Amino acid sequence: MRAAAASVSLLGTTALLFEAPGELALPSQQRIWALAHEAQGWPEVREAVPGMNNLMLTFERPPRSAAALDALEARLQAAWDAASPLPLEGRLVELPVVYGGEGGPHMADVVAHTGLSVEEVVELHSMRVYPVYALGSHPGYCYLGGMDPRIATPRRKVPVLSIPGGAVSIGGAQTGVSASAGPSGWNTIGSTAMSFFDPSQDPPAMLQPGDMIRFRVEGVVK
């Protein structure tokens, strides 16, 4: 039986976005990695950038007609249908986190939404090992999978204008760590001193898709 169809949309005239069908999960994300690996070798593709359950392609030679675009979409769909999960053997990185206090100003909101205690939120958040699904949002930022659904908390109705680099946050069913200061609609529950992006290094991002993060409790401030 043929797999469900993906969604393909243009990003200006030099890129497109392939969005995989179905819910976000590690096997699906591993198929995105496999599709990125294959598409990177296509002659018309400049760069294949995996996102969360999606893939962005930028072009050396963009499709110049509706027929050429239709052919590329069909090629992408066929490659997706044939793709097998590609496990990436990455590093395990342990991040020391201070939960709550000034570095975790929204811990009380997560507690109120989930009905759990601070200690339970910290335990559930720190007990998992989180695979890095993709990089995005800002340089060095990692989208992580695998968070315990019991601490899922909706994104904030009013975003915070600036959170510091190293802010550990929850947004919906995901958790992540800010690589640099900037606005955010997620709920910040803690902070780490780890640096995630250094333009003088090669590669500049500390983590890559397939790496794993474990949050180590350095302290809990109420």
Image: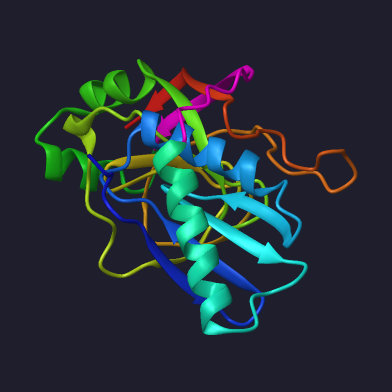
| Closer to the camera in the image, 92 or 19 | 19
**Left or right: 154, with 161 as reference point:** left
Instruction: Tell whether position 91 is magenta.
Output: yes
The C terminus sits in image quarter: top left
Q: Residue at position x 59%, y 82% from top?
A: 12
Q: Indicate whether 75 appears above or below 80.
A: below
Q: Indicate whether 196 appears above or below 96.
A: below
| Closer to the camera in the image, 137 or 68 | 68
Q: Residue at position x 32%, y 48% from top?
A: 106
Is residue 103 something that shows in the picture?
no
**Left or right: 66, with 119 as reference point:** right
Highlighted magenta segment, given as a residue range:
83-100
The N terminus sits in image quarter: top left
Residue 151 placement (x, y as % from top left):
22, 34
Q: Residue at position x 52%, y 26% from top?
A: 86
Instruction: Tell whether position 114 is magenta.
Output: no
| Closer to the camera in the image, 152 or 9 | 9
> Splitting the image into 4 quarters, where does residue 156 fall?
bottom left
> Splitting the image into 4 quarters, where does residue 25 fall?
top left
**Left or right: 146, with 102 as reference point:** left
Is residue 125 something that shows in the picture?
yes
Residue 6 placement (x, y as % from top left):
35, 56
Q: Indicate whether 152 appears above or below 221.
A: below
Residue 66 placement (x, y as % from top left):
52, 83
**Left or right: 132, with 25 as reference point:** right
Residue 144 placement (x, y as % from top left):
45, 36
Farthest residue in the left direction?
A: 115
